Image: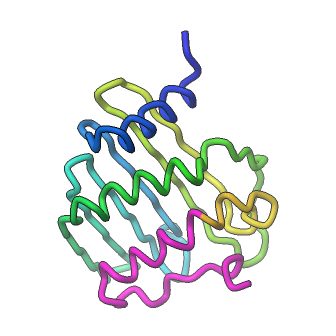
């Protein structure tokens, strides 16, 4: 039986070959309900349907877009290039000013997924996370027409 990581990687390799993204789902959450900057969530379905939401106390923003086929494929190529599931930050409490990040990639058709929850300061030890988060945050800001300009992480400032 194959390792779930290998299954995901083979599936992403297949996307590059066939451009078939059926059953895939990507989820990225930054912040939390207790974070002063709120909670931002990006979800991308295998169909290219994309939902970006932000909430902070009583304020809410919701953006829904359909990614172009090329942008959609590029997102899954990005995941293959920067496999966040290979990072293994230790479980710990937040350091002063830390932001919580949760990433999940699933192939619902195959019933497998990879997930990782970490603090933004973990990106110093695991550069693959920083290299993935930079374009993801850029995508979120583009989708929101920069309405979510608060989206920045101190660990990505360098």
Question: In the drawing, does residue 135 fall left or right of residue 95?
Answer: left
Residue shown at 49% from the left, 88% from the top: 150
Please state the extent of the stretch shown in magenta in the rendering.
132-158
Residue 138 on the magenta span: yes
Vertical relation: 20 (above or below) 78:
above
Q: Quadrant of residue 40?
A: bottom left
Residue 100 on the magenta span: no
Vertical relation: 68 (above or below) 82:
below
Colour logic: rainbow
Q: Nearer the viewer, residue 46 or 43?
A: 46
Question: Could you tell me how many numbered marks the image carries?
Answer: 0
Question: In the drawing, does residue 103 fall left or right of residue 73?
Answer: right
Residue reaching furthest to the top: 1
Residue shown at 31% from the left, 82% from the top: 144
Residue reaching furthest to the front: 17
Q: What is the quadrant of the C terminus in the image?
A: bottom right
């Amino acid at each position: 039986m194959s390792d779930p990581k290998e299954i995901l990687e083979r599936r992403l390799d297949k996307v590059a070959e066939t451009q078939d993204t059926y059953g895939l789902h990507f989820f990225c959450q930054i912040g939390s309900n207790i974070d002063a900057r709120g909670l931002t969530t990006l979800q991308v379905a295998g169909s290219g349907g994309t939902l970006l939401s932000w909430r902070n106390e009583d304020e809410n923003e919701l953006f829904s877009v359909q990614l172009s086929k090329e942008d959609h494929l590029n997102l899954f190529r990005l995941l293959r290039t920067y496999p966040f599931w290979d990072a293994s930050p230790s479980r710990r409490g937040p350091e002063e000013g830390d932001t919580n990040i949760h990433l999940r990639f699933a192939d619902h058709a195959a019933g497998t997924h990879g997930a990782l929850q970490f603090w933004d300061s973990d990106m110093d030890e695991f550069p693959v996370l920083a290299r993935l988060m930079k374009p993801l945050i850029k995508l979120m800001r583009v989708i929101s027409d920069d309405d979510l300009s608060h989206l920045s992480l101190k660990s990505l400032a360098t």
